[in-house]
Image (cartoon, rainbow, N blue to C red):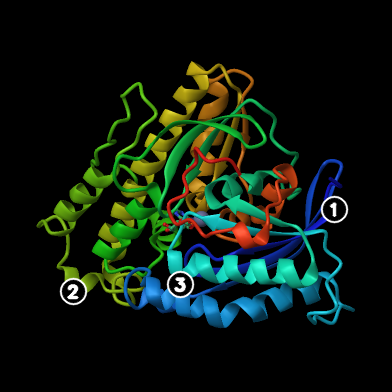
Amino acid sequence: MDKPKIILGIETSCDETAAAVARKDNDGVIILSNIVASSALLQAKYGGVVPEQAAREQLSNIIPVIQEALSQAFPDYQPTATNPPPIDAIAVTQGPGLIGSLLVGVETAKILSLVWEKPLVPVNHLVGHFYANWIKEPSASPSFPAIGLLVSGGHTDLVLMKGHGKFEYLGGTRDDAAGEAFDKTARLLGLPYPGGPVISKLAEKGDPGAFKLPRPMIDSKDSDFSFSGLKTAVSNIVHSSQFPPKARLAVGSTVHGKNRKPTNDLCASVEEAIVDVLATKTLRAARIHNVGQIVVAGGVAANKKLAEIFLNRAGKEISRAKISIPPPKLCTDNAAYIAAAAFFNYHPINPLELQADPSLSLSHSA
Ligand code: KG4
Ligand code: ZN
C-alpha cells in the first residue's frame, strides 16, 4: 500500500464543521488549508449544544467547508464528481460525538471516497486530538513512550502512548470532563458558552487564591479524575452572600461593568483548581511509568494557565521532561489533526462498511 502524501480530513463530531488538507513530509505534517465553521455562537443562545440544531448546521456547512478547504489548498482545482482533487486519501471522524453530527461527515466522506475513488480512513476523534502535536507548528514531533492527557468538552483521559495508535488507557473522569467544568462554571456565572475561553480571559484579572476550591482526587494514586464536586462548590459560592446577586453577573453588566472582581476571582480560582489537578495527576503518571514526554491535547489544552503550570512544574517533578502542547487553534476541534492522525495510522476501509460510532472510546485504535 503506497503511503499517502496528501490527505483531505473531515471532522463533524459536535458543533464544528471542519475540513482540512494536509501534506506529510519526512519530519512532520504541514497544513495546506484548515477550515472550521462553528455553530457555537448559535449554541451559545441555548447555553450549550442542542444536538438537532448542531446536526442541521453541519448539513448546511459541510459542502461549502470542504470546497473552501480544497480551493485554498489547490487554487486551480475545479471541484466536480468527475474531477477528483489531487489528494491521496480522505480521513473522517468516525466517533465519538453526536450521532446526527457524525453522520453528516461520515456519509459525505463515504460518497466522496466512492466517486473520487480515493481510500477512506476512519479516525477516532479522541486519538485525532493527540495528533495536533504531530503537526509542524511550530515545534518538533513528540517521542514515544509518552503520557497523553486529553482534555476536551466531553473527555478527560490519561493514556500511555507506546507508539502510533498504541495507546493504553490509564484512567479518566468519573463524572464531568475538564471542559465541562469550565462550561458549567460559565453557565453558573451567566457567561457564554463555551466557557473555557471566557473564564480564562476573566481569570487573567482575578486572584486564584481568592476562593478555596476542592481539588477532587488530586491525591489518589490512580489516573482517574472527578470534576462534579468542583461545580457544586462553585454553585454554593455563587449562591452565597460572598457573591453579588446573580442578576448582576449577566454578560455585559458584570463582565464589562464595575462589579466584576468577584467573577474574575472565581474564574481564576476555578481555572487554577482544574489545571492543578490535571498537571498533578499527569506528572504523577509520568513518574509512575518513568516517562519524560508529555503530550497534551483537546480544547482545554488551549488554556494558557495550563501550559504555564505544566512548563513550570515538569522540569522539577519528572526527569527528562518534554512537554508538547499544540498551538491553541489546533487544540479545539478541527480537521487538520484528523488528517494528521490518518498519516500515522493509515488503515483504509471499504467505504460501504464505515458506520458512524457515537460511543467510540480511546481503547479503540485510530
Ligand atoms: O476539543 P474541543 O474543541 O471539543 C470537544 O471535543 O469537546 O473542546 C471544547 C472544550 C470546551 O469545554 C471549552 O470550554 C474548552 O474546550 N476550551 C477551553 C479553552 N478553549 C476551549 N478551556 C479552557 N481554556 C481555554 N482557553
Ligand atoms: Zn474534540
Which residue ends up furthest to the left in the rendered image? 241
Q: Is residue 273 above or below residue 124?
A: above
Q: Mark 3 points at which residue?
A: 40
Q: Helix, strand or loop at disc 1?
A: loop
**Residue at x-position 58% and y-position 49%:** 129
Camera-near label (3 vs 1) is 1
| Quadrant location of the N terminus in the rendered image | top right
Distance from label 2 to label 1 (Cα)?
A: 55 Å
Is residue 211 visible from the viewing direction of this image?
A: no
Q: Name the residue under label 1.
A: 5
Distance from label 3 to label 2 (Cα)?
A: 24 Å
**Residue at x-position 55% and y-position 66%:** 12
Q: Name the residue under label 2.
A: 247
Q: In this view, does 264 lie to the left or right of 278?
A: left
Which residue ends up furthest to the right in the rendered image? 76
Q: Are marks 2 and 1 in contact (CB under 8 Å)?
A: no
| Residue 360 position in % (x across, y down) | 47, 49
| Quadrant location of the C terminus in the rendered image | top right
Question: In this view of the protein, which residue sits in the foreground, 1 or 284?
Answer: 1
Going by the numbered disc 1, the residue's amino acid type is: Lys
